[in-house]
Amino acid sequence: MIFLYNFGIYLYYFGIWIASFFNKKAQLWRKGRQHLFKRIENQTIIKKNKNSKIVWIHVASLGEFEQGRPLIEHLKKEAAEKYQIVLSFFSPSGYELRKNYPLADFVTYMPLDTVTNAKRFLDAIQPDIAVFVKYEFWFHHLKELKSRQIPTLLIAAVFRPDQIFFRSYGTFFRKLLTNDYFNQIFVQDKASLALLQNIGCQQVVLAGDTRIDRVTAIAAAAKTFPLIQQFVGNDNALICGSTWAADETLIFNWLQKTGSNVFKKIIIAPHEIGKTHIQDLQKKLPHKTICYSQLVDNQPIDDAMILIIDNIGMLSALYRYGKVAYVGGGFGTGIHNILEPAAFGLPILFGTKYQKFVEANALIAAGGAFSVQNLEQLTQKIAFLEDSNHWNLASNVVNQYLNQNQGATIFILNYINKL
């Protein structure tokens, strides 16, 4: 099986190499690993403080970084002199955006998972503790950590019955979940806990989702936007965040059908904010629109009903001005962050691709979030939430979920402090 694993690793690299000639992301992946060890071995940040412990935190990409980020922030806040952080990424989409992340002492790509690379990488960064986030299982790096007796943790983990670990042919990967490789596994939900316990994993504990700690902290300190408040006024607003083309088409159709009798104001923060896309949005929307960049202090906004956010960085705080949130991505690879609107107690709507997200499943089951497949369902759910009693029940569910699931970061931090 190890032979097949190694063959798969080299086959993956070959595929990336071929794709890099015509795919920008693959090109970044390949170029980012050129001279990688030279950069790592020449860094001078690590071990400046001989009394500190080096914590290596590895994430796949940006989404996993957001789940590891609260832990990094607490490690630096609680004991900046005690811990130095080495942050590694597998994907260029995460690395390129966070390569200058100020709370990490060193940010790097993770090398390809081979025996030689694992030994050389660990020789260079010299970790005292290793933390993998959510989905990362690299055999040779885990084996080398084990051979060096370096405490290794998996945090914010989520498992599903259809994963290879729980298949009859998944013995090789199932072994990676044992205490031979991970000293402790912190899972997000009870279903994941049960799955691991059923295959004999003893070093597993229910901790929750670290992102909940982050979004509640962000909401508590959220910026105010006077221009947004001016636009919304005293009206109920629907906030549509991180929308893709399929989401936007659904919203267009709903607006044409209903004339938005429920929401007098609509705020759309599209995933794509290029000039062409923004202009296309304005042409397709059946009501008068205005872009955020066009708003001017203390000047009337005329009769614009729809505000398009044509910048990046405002969305997490924008939800404070909404009554209901629609989160995009649910007709593509998966929904975007629904915890951000949840932090403000908003009932949440999204498409059909939500099954891999613990928080989405939990909120749907409890009645705080709603998946919609088509125009008819979107119209029904919005009409349902128009009733103040229904809205209050849904909002209370969302608030209760966040209140009951806070504290994962401190729980993990307390474990690390004892190592």
Image (cartoon, rainbow, N blue to C red):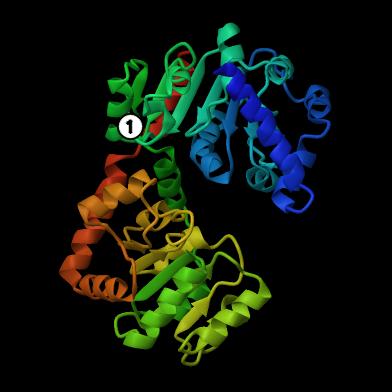
Rendering coords of residue 298 (x, y %): 54, 84
Pointer 1 residue = 192
Q: Residue at x 68, y 44 (%)?
A: 92
Image quarter (top left, top right, bottom left or bottom right) of the N terminus? top right
In the rendered image, the residue lying farthest to the left is 389
Q: Residues within 10 Å of mark 1 (few under 14, many from 20)?
A: many
Identify residue type, mark 1.
Ser
Rendering coords of residue 76 (x, y %): 57, 30
Disc 1, SS: helix
Image quadrant in which you'd find residue 273: bottom right
Q: Is residue 296 in view from this perspective?
A: no
Q: Is residue 419 above or below residue 20?
A: above
Image quadrant in which you'd find residue 258: bottom left
Q: Is residue 305 in view from this perspective?
A: yes
In the foreground, 49 or 244? 244
In the foreground, 311 or 231? 311
Rendering coords of residue 265 (x, y %): 40, 80
Rendering coords of residue 70 (x, y %): 49, 37
Q: Is residue 416 above or below residue 60?
A: above
In the foreground, 183 or 6? 6
Count of numbered circles in the view: 1
Q: Residue at x 54, y 36 (%)?
A: 73
